[in-house]
Image: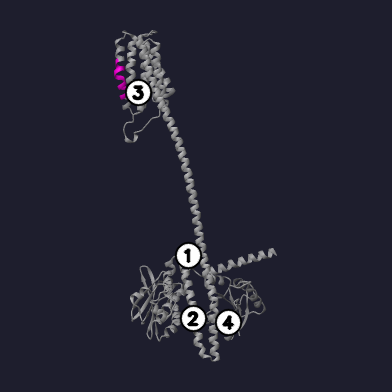
Amino acid sequence: MTGGAGKQGPITAAIPALRLSDRSGKTNVHPIVKLDYLVRMLAVPVTVVTVLATRGGNVPKALLGILLFYGLAWPHLAYLVARTSKDSKAAELRNLLADCFVLGGFCGVTGFNPMVSIAFLCCINAANLSLGGIPFAARGLFFAMLGAGAAVLWLGFHLTLETNPFTNFLASLSIAIFMSVFGYLSHVQTRRLLGARQEVLEQKLMIEEQKDAVEAASRVAEEERRSAEEAREAAEAANKAKSAFLANMSHELRTPLNAIIGYGELLQEEATDAGHDDMIPDLQKICGAGKHLLRLINSVLDLSKIEAGKMDLFIETFEIEDLVDEVASTAEPLVAKNGNRFELRLAPGLGQLKGDVTKLKQVLLNLIGNSGKFTENGTISLDVTREIDYEGSWITFRVADTGIGMKPEQVSKLFQAFTQADAATTRKYGGTGLGLVLSRRFAQMMGGTITVKSEFGRGTEFAVRLPSDVANEEGDATSIHRIDSKSLIQAAEKLRVEAERKKAEGASRA
Amino acid sequence: MPRILIIEDNEMNRDMLSRRLQRRGYETRIAVDGAEGLAAVAREAPDVIIMDMGLPVVDGWEAARRLKASEETCRIPIIALTADAMLGDRDKAYAAGCDDFDTKPVDFARLLKKLETLLAARPGA
């Protein structure tokens, strides 16, 4: 058969190519190949016998050859050709057109016997319509006519209107077989179609359900997000309330303390002037207790601020020697109380330090104050050195004493809040128990450390090690506020503008 | 002797501060809120003002802004006092035009030093 490749278009479109085993790499044989093989095995012998029966004994040798070839070899040959072809469906359709040609020819050779012709044409049409649709069926009829024409040219035109019962039977059998096979095929396809439609409906339903589920899930997620947001807001509000409470408490506690300390000092001065020296020690105790309470409040407030992340560093550059001079002049009277000597040793060329001078001063005074408390008739020294390592430049302040020292188990408790070396120490030496905790936190905030070495009965040494440029260590962390004249001027300008605006508003209202 | 105006709403603090300053030989005037303080300055200009920031009627920041905005009173030094040492109070006080800042309870020795410094810096002192 020589069906042009261009004409194959509508035919191949009528039967979609099934490529079920493409991935396995095997040659893909279209199901119609197998179906047609089966149909041919049944129908072709019947056809051949029908032709023979219709013609009676009058069979030329060439026709007999064709009938034998068609009856015995063709079903297998067609199957093999289609199977081994690259496009098995196209090959099979070509085979079918060959069948049409042959069957058309048989109509011719059987003298266009109505029973035989009707059977053949019915079979051709049923198969072609079922497998290739209307365009293919039309082509099939065309080929059948070609076949009939060829038969007329070969054996001459003659009509055989009478048929024997055997032919009738065979023709009926052919029709029955074909109608059954293609009827069943049509039923299967219809069912498959309905099944597919049902599947599509089910999938649609499933997609709807999934959509609903997704919507429900997103609603839940939205609710959860909202409740998380509410929780966060509540936490923020609680934190704000805590900060406000601390600020208020601090204010409320300081106001009466202000009066206690102030009047206590005033009374001391007046008692001195009036010669009531006997009252002075008691007044001193009132003032001392008041100041102690004030230190406690300040320390607790500082700790709370650190815990809340609200403690800010005020970074400025200062001369280390100036700081040490100031610390020394404040510390000397504290140290001298217990008959101690104060020694100051500064390495040459200490230069400047960039950090929070107030907090550093607080740390150093706290350490020196501690040493003074726990040392009698000894020496307290402050050594300041600068060292450079791979991390940068460091300033180390060492506060050493020749005091009572500590046991290792006491040292381990040093930096815990409200824990002095032990309870007995608190009774004997006083103190808030917060000084070292704060000192360590301040040093950490500035990117440094506080370490301690102590020998029981011999003395203690605290070392504060800070980067010489705290700002660089901390980078541009938000907790650092740089107080410079520029930002103050900007802030003042903002307030001035705001005040002017309010004034203008007031004026326009009046 | 230099005249100091103390603007403070807490009676005990006002009385105590005023008496202690008088003992050091300063002349003191008192006002109990921002409005009264502004009136007192208008009546008789002091050499230094010590002012609480959390004042009723007109608060300390507003009073400081008004004093610093006026040609006649802008050169009078102001020491701001606040009870809470929360962050921002110092900035706020300086931004309002205050010349110095201290927290309560007042360290009297330190306050005296600040007073002396400001008085010494006065033009014509």
Question: On the image, which quarter does residue B66 sit in?
Answer: bottom right
Q: Nearer the viewer, mark 2 or mark 4?
A: 2
Q: Nearer the viewer, mark 4 or mark 1?
A: 4
Residue type (three-letter) at the residue carrying disc 1: Thr
Task: Please state if A255 lies on the left or on the right of A11 as rendered.
Answer: right
Along the line of sight, the residue nearer the viewer: A317 or B97: B97
Tag 2 secondary structure: helix
| Same-chain status of marks 4 and 1 | no
**Residue at numbered disc 1:** A478
Q: Nearer the viewer, mark 1 or mark 3?
A: 3
Label 3 – label 4 distance at C-alpha:
120 Å
**Residue at numbered disc 2:** A289
| Same-chain status of marks 2 and 3 | yes
**Residue at numbered disc 3:** A36
Label 1 – label 3 distance at C-alpha:
83 Å
| Chain name for mark 4 | B
- Marks counted in the figure total 4
Residue type (three-letter) at the residue carrying disc 3: Asp
| Chain name for mark 3 | A
Task: Please state if A18 lies on the left or on the right of A243 as rendered.
Answer: left
Q: Position of residue B7 (x, y in %)?
A: 61, 77
Q: Position of residue A65 (x, y in %)?
A: 29, 14
Q: What residue is drawn where x is 50% and y is 77%?
A: A294
**Residue at numbered disc 4:** B16
Label 2 – label 4 distance at C-alpha:
19 Å
Q: Nearer the viewer, mark 2 or mark 3?
A: 2
Label 2 – label 3 distance at C-alpha:
114 Å
Residue type (three-letter) at the residue carrying disc 4: Met
| Same-chain status of marks 1 and 3 | yes
Tag 3 secondary structure: helix
| Chain name for mark 1 | A
Label 2 – label 1 distance at C-alpha:
37 Å
